[in-house]
Amino acid sequence: MSPSKFNSAENTSNPPQENGIGDHVSLVNSGKAIQELAQEPLLHGTDDHLVEFSETLRTVAKTLRRVSEGKASALAEAAQWKRKYELERARNLHLERKGLLASSTVPSEGHHGKDQIKASRNFPDEYTRVDEIAVQLDKCCGRNDICSHEVLRCGSPDSDSNTSQSKLMKKASFKLSWCCNGDKSNQHKHDIVSFEMGDITTAERSSKQISLKWESPPQTVFILMKPNSESVKVLCSELIRWFKEEKRLNIFVEPRVRGELLSESSYYSFVQTWQEEKEIMDLHTKVDFVVTLGGDGTVLWAASLFKGPVPPIVPFSLGSLGFMTPFCSEHYREYLSTVLHGPISITLRNRLQCYVVRDSAKNEIDEREGPILVLNEVTIDRGISSFLTNLECYCDNIFVTSVQGDGLILSTTSGSTAYSLAAGGSMVHPQVPGILFTPICPHSLSFRPLILPEHVTIRVQVPFNSRGHAWASFDGKGRKQLGPGDALVCSMAPWPVPTACQSDSTSDFLRSIHDGLHWNLRKMQASDGPRET
Ligand SMILES: NC(=O)c1ccc[n+]([C@@H]2O[C@H](COP(=O)([O-])OP(=O)(O)OC[C@H]3O[C@@H](n4cnc5c(N)ncnc54)[C@H](O)[C@@H]3O)[C@@H](O)[C@H]2O)c1
Ligand SMILES: Nc1ncnc2c1ncn2[C@@H]1O[C@H](COP(=O)(O)OP(=O)(O)OP(=O)(O)O)[C@@H](O)[C@H]1O
């Protein structure tokens, strides 16, 4: 074997030149040398080492030849693709310029049209060329189906054609807005997203922390207290004196409470109340804020007095659980001074409005009776009946399911920690907008609770073939019997209950599930013991 051949074989392993053509030439040369080397007969001699060395060299030479052949074919293929790419691009350019020329000849297009006509005067030569190219293109990629029009166009680096391309590539514009079922007017429609280049982003979030800031000082307070509690009565009397003497507020109480106060002392004669039930309807127009002294039941009671808008409620805890009562009564002066001064965080608690529709009313909701508003939940159960309830449920007139069991709870998210929780429903932050659909003891293994969006209307119907009656109760009160054919229709009410927070909505919620329910309380595992290796 001659040293020159050694050298040429070695040269093939040199890094190829950057330039594609030079690269190719050096590959061809080294390829030849390799071929010669590979065809050289095996050395026959006495030295075994030399034979072994020669064989190794032949193997290396063969491998190098395969590599060089592969690279050459890859280069050829790349060149073919490049040409196809250029042909396709030229064709696109041609089509687009043709389009522009056509639009520029329309006289009503103003000065833009003139510019485009001027620019198009430079085209003819290129047109002839691109027309030729287009013919070739039809032959190559048109027939073989290998060019992607869109992909090539997006990847085009040609800055001249960028404007016209972006015109052709522009995304269709659209807008999103809230719309109400059956609402033909545009009254309740407004944009919910900001639209930028067709990308959707939320413009506002419904569960923001809400802050209340008084624009004029509050003047009237309504104090509500749970009945039959001596400690609550004592606190109520103390609070009334403080509001009157320190804060110069007008004070409203329930008629029962005013009677109790007056039986104690005539001092309380300034305390106001109402004579007739219908006056309660106007209460929200007279009262700036409400103070409740009791447990969650007193907050529910307070909310139930307001059939329309509800003033902000400041709930003091004098019960056992107190999910909705974050204020400790011992520090009432401090808390109430902060409330009077503002700003304060509030939780806007949604309520459900419920209508009982009798079969005899032919499915017509009697709006005159007004809805029953609930802060926690409406429950439809079997009452004292020993039969399984059978309730047909519809959501926006779409059949959801038949509840066969003890009943169904339709709960607000505030009520999610009450009866619904006991029936296996999830706990939900009170500012999450939604309606919980929780079965009570369903006679089915697969009936999991649901959470439906706030905007739906739910209808729970007692079927005509039902064996028994059902009973609806509202925040655990005011039971109404539902016979076969009767229904309960329920949707989100427009009047939420604003309750003052001790810190903020989320901290108060988390504190109440920790302190009230001891949620996920478990002794921490000791750090000593077995470890993963
Ligand atoms: N099995 C149950 O858990 C069950 C049964 C019936 C009623 N309730 C609940 O009782 C409520 C009526 O309350 P009440 O005080 O007038 O009756 P109540 O005196 O019988 O008290 C019921 C308990 O539920 C608690 N509660 C009320 N609302 C709550 C809420 N939003 N989050 C967490 N706990 C809450 C109260 O603090 C009280 O401890 C109903 O709305 C219903 O949710 C629960
Ligand atoms: N002003 C009121 N008038 C009539 N009933 C009321 C009034 N305030 C509360 N109630 C009712 O009294 C019951 C008990 O009230 P609440 O839940 O506030 O006290 P509690 O039972 O001592 O508290 P907890 O439930 O936390 O142990 C509830 O059913 C509630 O509806």
Image: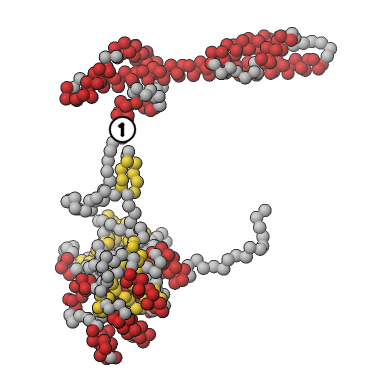
Please name the amino acid that badge 1 sits on: Lys
Mark 1, residue position:
170
The percent coordinates of residue 471 (x first, y second) are 28, 72
The percent coordinates of residue 318 (x first, y second) are 39, 79
Quadrant of ligand 2: it is bottom left
Q: Residue furthest right?
A: 46
The percent coordinates of residue 57 (x first, y second) are 72, 16
Task: Say left or right for 78 vs 297.
Answer: right
Task: Say left or right for 177 vs 23.
Answer: left
Q: Residue at x 33, y 13 (%)?
A: 126
Q: Residue at x 36, y 83 (%)?
A: 235
Q: Is residue 61 visible?
A: yes
Front residue of 257 and 61 = 257
Q: Is 90 placed above or below 278 here?
A: above
Front residue of 281 and 234 = 234
Task: Say left or right for 101 vs 86.
Answer: left
Where residue 488 sits, quadrant-wise, is bottom left
Q: Residue at x 29, y 66 (%)?
A: 214
